[in-house]
Image (cartoon, helix red, strand yellow):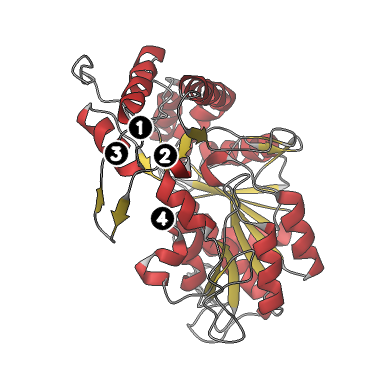
Amino acid sequence: MKDIEPFQNKVWLSTPTMHGEEIRYITEAYESNWMSTVGENINEVERLMAEKIGAKHAIALSSGTASLHLAIKLAGEKLYGKTKTSKGALAGHKVFCSDMTFGATVNPVTYEGGEPIFIDTEYDTWNMSPEALSRAFELYPDVRLIVVAHLYGTPGKIDQIRAIAKEHEALIVEDAAESLGATYKNTQTGIFGDFGCISFNGNKIITGSSGGMFFCKKEEDANQIRKWSTQAREDAPWYQHEEVGYNYRMSNVIAGVVRGQIPYLEEHIAQKKAIYERYKEGLKDLPVQMNPYDETNSKPNFWLSCMIINPDATCRQVRDDHSALYISEPRKSCPTEILETLAKYNAEGRPIWKPMHMQPIYRNNDFITKDGSSRAKTNAYIPSSVTDISMDIFERGLCLPSDNKMTAEDQDKVIQIIHECFK
């Protein structure tokens, strides 16, 4: 790669893209002295997001994780009643969770005392496998809660998952943190579940630097979330508390940033889609595939462009919990080689999310594949022919630089670097 010069300015995975209107709303919060968790920016963000997504109720919270926590807490109490102990609403209960996702999807289940059971991925969308979910209900027919994520902005097989949930009278918490603006059958993600959550973290499709949003259909649920998120204060002249609450409300300052970003959501999606299409065209002669989606029913927001290397073109690679080694082979490559090479040229990529069932904290939790295998402590088996799809995607896949401020010339150089890795 002697003819390729490093990037003078780093090419990032995904960073905030600001437009100027954000500072106007931040200034309004400052000048009006509404700097805390009430104010016009919060009201407007909730109204605008409910309108854009098609939700009946939207509550602005401090993070996507806060939204997921309160969604899972609310689902637990609806299913099993309020707990009189500090163990959490899901204490003693199992919950089916997407396996290939960020830890924030799953950790709130443990906050509430639940036991995550991980459901394998499928190749069509890299999301929860409906076949594995059906098998999971055969093993655990008493489960009543499903937490499903839309990976990298791509909707999962929503109709199938909802049909399975309905059959087993299970609630769905929809983690749409990465998929704001993505649609399935012309409906926005975030409102397919009983409760939906999105994130405005710094690297998301639009940002507040932090922040999140909770969506629901019933006013009583919205009121409960508002109460919990403001320390569960009762209607009294003093600070009266009759249940545990949290400091989870979005600040009016953060809401100002989000308010200024909302009008640019579609523009950001168009930019991200162009990046995806350029990668797809530029890498078409290599033994790789882009992260897939259902072109008939869904429109991703293309938050991150990812690729997966064909099995016969993947060089040997081993990973432990903190490091990776590979053996370079002609006309083959692997995620570690490509990511390390990009880093040498001052470009940032990232491994695919490491599956939850392989995380040290969750390795003793059960994991269900479409073949019916699991690590269940009872009535389960592990046939030798089982394919762990989550781990297969993790071993062969990677996230490419997807910053929407990256120029076409920058992306052409990234594509050239990847081509060189396969020589």
User: Which quadrant is the C terminus positioned in?
Assistant: top left
Q: Amino acid at mark 4?
A: Lys
| Contact flag, marks 1 and 3 (Cβ < 8 Å) | yes
- Mark 1 vs mark 2: which is more N-terminal? 2
- Mark 3 vs mark 4: which is more N-terminal? 3
Instruction: Between residue 109 and residue 226, name the one nearer to us.
Output: 109
Residue on which disc 4 sits: 354
Residue at screen point 59% across, 36% down: 44
Q: Secondary structure at mark 2?
A: helix
Q: Secondary structure at mark 4?
A: loop
Q: Nearer the viewer, mark 4 or mark 2?
A: 2
Residue at screen point 76% across, 51% down: 159
Q: Nearer the viewer, mark 4 or mark 1?
A: 1
Q: Residues within 10 Å of mark 4 (few under 14, many from 20)?
A: some
From the viewer's perspective, is residue 153 above or below residue 237?
above
Measure the C-alpha gap from mark 1 to mark 2: 7 Å
From the viewer's perspective, is residue 107 above or below residue 37?
below
Residue on which disc 1 sits: 331
Q: Secondary structure at mark 3?
A: loop
Measure the C-alpha gap from mark 4 to mark 1: 26 Å
